[in-house]
């Protein structure tokens, strides 16, 4: 019997108005891939059901690309958007939800403002995911430049708050093309019954096969960034491995 499908979320990370890829989330490592609307449109035309859309400038606290991200959502219809970066208070959360994103990710706010994050989770349910951006067992905040607490402590708190979904990034693997952290993902699925979206390190179709084998444990999807932009495989090939 074929394993249940693995959802794929091509990533469009936006910095200074451009679609970029970073290495391990570090500023200064950007490779520029042009207009984010064109990048998202390309993924949609190639069959993407979801796009993971990140405002990196907002995540780093050095500006924002809110109007441009709204253009992506409006000008690339028919694709579901997971929106993240800089969603840290009522105004940014409401703006993100009103923009037409299917769901939004809280990162820093879930670490630094647990009460507000819990109230957002209680109010918006499945529209909120929490990004667990991890180095070892320590969470990363504010553009991955600051430590944000112990993974297992924060996960237990978010479980109590009723968090609907986790987006788990191994920061040390992000943009490195060295394979996803299957051990970390497995360990997190053992602590929660909620779906987990995997991010960081995907480099090959074999990595997608390995992630698909974790779907019965609770891995729901995979964010694919550099591997697609570096032509390690095509989105159509990835879809064939993940969905068929
Ligand atoms: O996606 C990246 O490459 C990235 C790099 C450095 C920092 C953050 C990054 N992405 C995502 O940003 C949000 C967190 O934003 P915030 O803390 O809520 O403002 C999270 O989804 C990260 O995965």
Image (cartoon, rainbow, N blue to C red):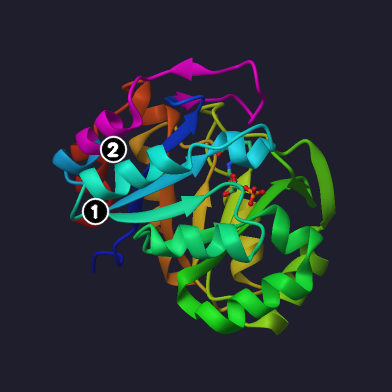
Instruction: Please state if 31 lies on the left or on the right of 37 as rendered.
Output: right
Q: Is residue 63 above or below residue 223?
A: above
Can you identify the residue that label 2 sits on?
A: 40
Give the alpha-carbon distance from disc 1 to disc 2, as whole Å.
9 Å
Residue 24 falls inside the magenta stretch? yes
Residue 219, position in %: x, y? 47, 63
Instruction: Please state if 91 lies on the left or on the right of 153 as rendered.
Output: left
Give SS at disc 2: helix
Residue 76 falls inside the magenta stretch? no
- Label 1 with label 2: CB-CB less than 8 Å: yes
Q: Is residue 25 above or below residue 103?
A: above
Ligand 1 lies in quarter: top right
**Is ligand 1 within 8 Å of the beta carbon of the residue shown at mark 1?**
no
The residue lying at 51 percent from left, 78 percent from top is 124
Query: Neighbour class for label 1 at 10 Å: few (<14), some, many (≥20)?
Result: some
Q: Nearer the viewer, residue 178 or 161?
A: 161
Q: Nearer the viewer, residue 71 or 44?
A: 71
- Answer whether residue 194 is visible to the viewer in this image: yes
Residue 83, position in %: x, y? 46, 52
Q: Nearer the viewer, residue 237 or 156?
A: 156
Can you identify the residue that label 1 sits on?
A: 79
Residue 233, position in %: x, y? 29, 29
Q: Which residues are magenta?
A: 20-42
Q: Quadrant of the N terminus?
A: bottom left
């Amino acid at each position: 019997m074929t394993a249940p499908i693995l959802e794929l979320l091509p990533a469009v990370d936006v910095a200074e108005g451009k679609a970029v890829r970073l290495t391990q989330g570090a500023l200064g490592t950007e490779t520029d891939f042009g207009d984010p609307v064109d990048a998202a449109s390309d993924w949609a035309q190639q069959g993407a059901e979801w796009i993971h859309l990140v405002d990196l400038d907002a995540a780093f606290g050095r500006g924002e690309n809110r109007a441009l991200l709204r253009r992506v959502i409006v000008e690339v219809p028919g694709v579901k958007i997971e929106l993240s970066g800089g969603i840290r208070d009522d105004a940014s959360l409401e703006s993100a939800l009103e923009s037409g994103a299917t769901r939004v990710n809280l990162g820093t706010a879930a670490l630094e403002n647990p009460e507000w994050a819990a109230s957002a989770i209680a109010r918006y349910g499945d529209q909120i995911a929490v990004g667990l951006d991890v180095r070892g067992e320590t969470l990363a905040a504010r553009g991955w430049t600051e430590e944000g607490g112990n993974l297992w402590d924060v996960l237990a708190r978010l479980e109590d708050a009723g968090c609907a979904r986790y987006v788990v990034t191994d920061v040390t693997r992000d943009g490195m093309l060295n394979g996803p952290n299957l051990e970390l993902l497995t360990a997190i699925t053992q602590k929660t019954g909620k779906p987990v979206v995997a991010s960081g390190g995907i480099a090959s179709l074999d990595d997608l096969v390995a992630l698909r084998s974790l779907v019965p444990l609770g891995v729901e999807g995979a964010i694919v960034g550099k591997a697609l932009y570096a032509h390690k495989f095509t989105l159509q090939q990835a879809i064939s491995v993940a969905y068929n």
